[in-house]
């Protein structure tokens, strides 16, 4: 196969072609995947909340994250996020949905430039080269009961009018970044009131809409108490949910909600490694797929950044629950690796508005694998994907292009030294005793 590129896109694909002078040659090429859900700054917290302190849960981890939030500066956000984005590229992700909620200064005050933090995220995307769907987050309260935000949450909060101006600023930011897309993210039903969801409707028109939902059992119980419905149920009953929407986590959706969510054509944004680390539980994947549901994968807290590891964790979690093998494959004689990869490719493209694969006219987002590896030698077709996902690692990823630009060579981001140097300066200050 010979791919000719123009303007960052695939202009022509020729089969049974011979390489020409100056061509870049790779053994095995795959489309890069979209990382549908990231909090870039949380990369700096990875491994910092693994000490037991009573009954540990998502909520105790959140307390540790909030402590980290109180000290982080705009410069830190840019440095840490740039490292996360570079590592995503090294791990086979070529586009990221940045669920961006860290808007204000440590005291909860607006920066003189209200879009300061969004500009830092865009700068991290620019230096790393990853494709960006910027998802500015609306956050207004501390819980379903309307309580005031706690001190750390004040860094996230805006009123509707102020957020609309911030959103306009974010539109200007993405216009200046090659291939970037603007979406919108009401944080969750616990952080956004029903009235505010209605007020946000004009911003949601014709663009990606992402929301955290049903990640924790406590969240479901609190929602039932205040809104008299479960979170997924309430959203489906009260809003026009369609293919623009991405429901992040939906871990504790019940059977009826899973069926309705699948029928809505919204994407389930699953983050298997982060959900496992936080003790969230596992999404009902086989039931969702049985209803022709669409899913994508995300890295959420950015503990590990790997397409391979996320897809493997997704399937292995289901195997442990079902006490069965090849759960995601569904049909007889169907490859599990191919099913996982293709569904994550198409679901991620839908959720973030990005490339749907290696085809003429699509962005040239290409991941080249090491064809000499003992993991892949002799494998063909679907068995290659099965071997990659269930026996491979990021070491198999040798070269990555995003928008036709080579960003990873010999498994390492081309600007890794510079990015790591800035990261180390920030993290040393943030975690010093």
Image (spheres, rainbow, N blue to C red):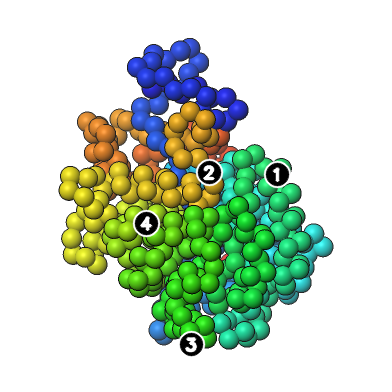
Q: Which mark is residue 225?
A: 3
Front residue (pair 201, 433): 201
Q: Earlier in the sequence, mark 3 or mark 1?
A: 1
In the rendered view, tell whether residue 375 sits above or below residue 23.
Answer: below
Q: Disc 2 or disc 3, which is closer to the eye?
A: 3
Query: Which numbered mark, 3 or 1, is in the foreground of this view?
Result: 3
State the residue in front, 368 or 251: 251
The residue tagged with tag 3: helix, strand or loop?
helix
Q: Position of residue 209 (x, y in %)?
A: 56, 59
Cα distance, mark 2 to mark 3?
Answer: 38 Å
- Which label's residue is closer to the chain start, 2 or 3? 3
Distance, label 1 to label 4, CA atoms, is 32 Å
Mark 4 vs mark 2: in front: 4
* Residue occupied by mark 2: 354
Query: Secondary structure under badge 1?
Result: helix
Horizontal and vertical percent for residue 343? 37, 48
Mark 4 neighbour density, 10 Å: few (under 14) some (14–19) many (20 or more): many
State the residue at coordinates (35%, 45%). 341
- Residue displayed at 23% across by 53% down: 330
Q: Secondary structure at mark 4?
A: loop
Find disc 4 in the rendering and name its residue.
293
Compared with 388, 231 (above or below) is below
Residue at point 48%, 72% (across, down): 237
Image quarter (top left, top right, bottom left or bottom right) of the N terminus: top left
* In this rendering, the label closer to the viewer, 1 or 4: 4
Which quarter of the picture shows residue 397?
top left
- Decide which of tag 4 and tag 2 comes sooner along the chain: 4
Q: Which residue is mark 1?
A: 175
As measured in the structure, the alpha-carbon distance from the residue carrying label 4 to the one carrying label 3 is: 28 Å
**Of the image marks 1 and 4, the number of the one nearer the N terminus:** 1
Number of marks drawn: 4
């Amino acid at each position: 196969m010979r791919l000719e590129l123009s303007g960052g896109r695939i202009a022509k694909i020729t089969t049974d072609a011979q390489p020409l002078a100056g061509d870049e040659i790779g053994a095995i090429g795959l489309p890069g995947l979209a990382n549908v859900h990231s909090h870039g700054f949380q990369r700096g917290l990875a491994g910092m909340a693994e000490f037991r302190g009573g009954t540990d849960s998502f909520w105790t981890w959140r307390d540790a994250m909030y402590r980290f939030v109180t000290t982080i500066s705009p410069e830190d956000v840019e440095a840490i996020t740039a490292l996360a984005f570079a590592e995503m590229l090294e791990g086979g992700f070529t586009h990221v949905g940045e669920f961006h909620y860290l808007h204000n200064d440590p005291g909860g005050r607006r920066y003189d430039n209200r879009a300061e933090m969004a500009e830092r995220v865009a700068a991290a995307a620019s230096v790393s080269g990853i494709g960006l769907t910027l998802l500015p987050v609306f956050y207004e309260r501390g819980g379903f009961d309307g309580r005031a935000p706690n001190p750390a949450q004040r860094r996230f909060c805006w009123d509707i009018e102020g957020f609309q101006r911030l959103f306009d600023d974010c539109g200007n930011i993405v216009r200046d970044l090659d291939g970037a897309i603007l979406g919108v993210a009401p944080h969750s039903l616990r952080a956004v009131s029903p009235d505010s969801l209605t007020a946000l409707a004009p911003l949601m028109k014709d663009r990606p809409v992402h929301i955290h939902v049903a990640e924790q059992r406590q969240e479901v119980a609190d929602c039932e108490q205040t809104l008299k419905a479960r979170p997924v149920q309430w959203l489906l009953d009260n809003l026009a949910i369609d293919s623009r929407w991405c429901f992040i986590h939906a871990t504790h959706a019940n059977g009826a909600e899973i069926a309705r969510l699948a029928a809505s054509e919204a994407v389930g944004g699953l983050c298997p490694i982060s959900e496992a680390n936080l003790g969230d539980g596992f999404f009902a994947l086989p039931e969702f797929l049985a209803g022709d549901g669409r899913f994508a994968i995300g890295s959420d807290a950015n503990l590990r950044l790997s397409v391979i590891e996320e897809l493997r964790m997704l399937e292995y979690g289901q195997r442990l629950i079902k006490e069965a093998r090849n759960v995601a494959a569904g049909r007889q004689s169907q490859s599990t690796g191919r099913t996982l990869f293709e569904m994550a490719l198409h679901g991620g493209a839908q959720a973030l508005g990005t490339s749907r694969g290696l085809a003429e006219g699509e962005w040239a987002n290409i991941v080249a694998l090491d064809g000499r590896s003992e993991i892949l030698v002799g494998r063909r077709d679907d068995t290659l994907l099965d071997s990659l996902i269930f026996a491979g690692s990021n070491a198999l990823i040798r070269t990555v292009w995003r928008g036709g630009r080579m960003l990873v060579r010999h498994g390492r981001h081309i600007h890794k030294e510079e990015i790591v140097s800035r990261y180390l300066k920030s993290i040393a200050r943030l975690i010093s005793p």
